[in-house]
Image: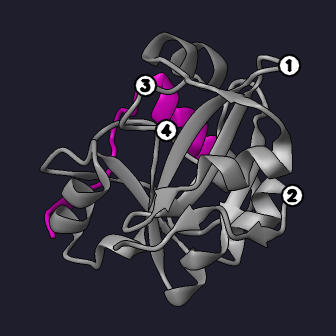
């Protein structure tokens, strides 16, 4: 794994750094030498299992227009019907919506540090691992965490919102 400290972070990475500090998280984000726009790229760069990547998938809540953030394991696909059963009707979120609603570009959406609080869900499949990695506001920035951190930080209980790989 090739990583470096982040000497002069972008605004979006700095928001993640600040959020993690406020949450009392001791492990700061690092920059990967290789891009981690996808869960597979991140897993390859970190030398970890695909499921250890906590990917952040964003939808648009059809009624309120708010972002719906689903944090799930990189080896799973979001079950949109299961998500909608919990939060209501969903709509697709294009890149412009994701940036406006979260403050992050697709490929760097962090579970923390959003410019506007999302409706959040955390998939229960992440608890297969002791340590996971999440995006930190940039396609090359990631940070380590434990699955137990997410419910505390996002104020939600884990729930089954993905499908296992076929």
How far apart marks 4 and 2 lie (CA) works out to: 18 Å
In this view, the mark in front (4 or 1):
1
Q: Tell me, yes or no, if residue 100 can be seen here.
A: yes
How far apart marks 4 and 1 lie (CA) works out to: 20 Å
Residue bearing mark 1 = 64
Label 3 Cα neighbours within 10 Å, binned few <14 / some 14-19 / many ≥20:
some
Label 2 Cα neighbours within 10 Å, binned few <14 / some 14-19 / many ≥20:
few
Whether the residues at callouts 3 and 4 have beta carbons within 8 Å, the answer is yes
In this view, the mark in front (2 or 1):
1
Q: Where does the image place residue 118, in percent across and percent down from the top left?
A: 76, 35
Q: Which quadrant, please, contains the N terminus?
A: bottom left
Residue bearing mark 4 = 109
Residue stretch rendered in magenta on the structure: 1-18
How far apart marks 2 and 1 lie (CA) works out to: 19 Å
The disc, 2 or 1, on the residue closer to the chain's N-terminal end is 1
In the picture provided, is 104 more to the left or to the right than 142?
A: right
Q: Nearer the viewer, residue 30 or 132?
A: 132
The disc, 4 or 2, on the residue closer to the chain's N-terminal end is 4
Q: Give the structural element (helix, strand or loop) at label 1.
A: loop
The disc, 4 or 1, on the residue closer to the chain's N-terminal end is 1
The disc, 1 or 3, on the residue closer to the chain's N-terminal end is 1
How far apart marks 3 and 4 lie (CA) works out to: 6 Å
Above or below, 144 relative to 33 = below
Q: Give the structural element (helix, strand or loop) at label 3.
A: loop
In the picture provided, is 105 more to the left or to the right than 161?
A: left
Residue bearing mark 3 = 105
Residue bearing mark 2 = 155
Q: Nearer the viewer, residue 16 or 132?
A: 132
Q: Where does the image place residue 26, in percent across and percent down from the top left?
A: 59, 69
């Amino acid at each position: 794994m090739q990583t470096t400290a982040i000497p002069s972070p972008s605004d979006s990475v700095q928001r993640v750094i600040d959020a993690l500090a406020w949450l009392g998280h001791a492990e700061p984000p690092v920059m990967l030498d290789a891009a981690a726009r996808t869960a597979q790229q991140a897993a390859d760069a970190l030398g970890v299992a695909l499921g250890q990547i906590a990917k952040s998938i964003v939808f648009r809540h059809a009624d309120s227009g708010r972002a719906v953030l689903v944090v799930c394991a990189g080896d799973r696909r979001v079950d949109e019907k299961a998500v909608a059963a919990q939060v209501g009707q969903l709509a697709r979120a294009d890149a412009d919506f994701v940036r406006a609603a979260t403050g992050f570009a697709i490929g760097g959406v962090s579970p923390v540090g959003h410019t506007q609080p999302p409706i959040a869900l955390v998939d229960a499949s992440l608890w297969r691992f002791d340590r996971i990695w999440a995006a930190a506001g940039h396609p090359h920035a990631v940070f380590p965490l434990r699955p137990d951190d997410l419910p505390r930080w996002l104020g939600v209980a884990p729930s089954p919102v993905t499908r296992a790989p076929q």
